[in-house]
Image (cartoon, rainbow, N blue to C red):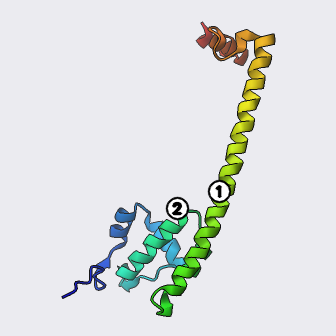
Amino acid sequence: MAIDLRRPNRTFTIRQLCLEFKCTPRALRFYEDKGLISPARDGMNRVYSYKDRARLQLILRGKRVGLALSEIGEILDLYELNDGGAAQNAKSLVKFRERIVELEAQRNDIEQAIDELRKGCDALEEHLKATRPDLLPRAADYDQVLRERLGDLEHAK
């Protein structure tokens, strides 16, 4: 006999989900306002289903990898098609591959910026070696000179 590990009849409070996913009630209400989750109501209290919990998990994963809420919503909406998740998986695959390309481009940009900054530091150090070696970070009196130049004479003593 198979056991449904998802326990679809289980419900969660806003507090339980916030503690589990380390998010704020405000964030959950925001996702509700955006139509990404749809908790039931018990008077003034929100009652989250297992489906809401699963959707929240996907929302937070999508945000963590940099997907826009609109993209996350597109993926979540495909769950309702009852096609075994095929359309949702296909859409997710496209979005994930696009995001990988974007992140790789950002990584290349960051690596280039770091290289430029290192070259700049090397050039500045060479210039200071030739003109004012006392201002080099490795110079014994660097901290003293820097504090004096910044007007922090009390700490320079």
Q: Which residue is mark 2?
A: 64
Q: Nearer the viewer, residue 75 or 16?
A: 75
Single out the residue that lies furthest toward the left: 1
Q: Are marks 1 and 2 in contact (CB under 8 Å)?
A: no
Q: Secondary structure at mark 2?
A: helix
For the question of whether residue 73 can be seen, the reply is no
Residue at horizontal 30 percent and vertical 80 percent from the top: 6
Q: Position of residue 101 (x, y in %)?
A: 66, 63
Residue at horizontal 47 percent and vertical 85 percent from the top: 85
- The amino acid type of the residue labelled 1 equals Glu
Q: Position of residue 48 (x, y in %)?
A: 37, 79
Q: Which residue is mark 1?
A: 104
Residue at horizontal 65 percent and vertical 16 percent from the top: 152
Q: Of label 1 and label 2, which has the lower sequence position? A: 2
Q: Position of residue 142 (x, y in %)?
A: 66, 13
Residue at horizontal 22 percent and vertical 86 percent from the top: 2
Q: Nearer the viewer, residue 64 or 19?
A: 64
Rendered image: mark on residue 91: none
Q: Quarter of the image containing the C terminus?
A: top right
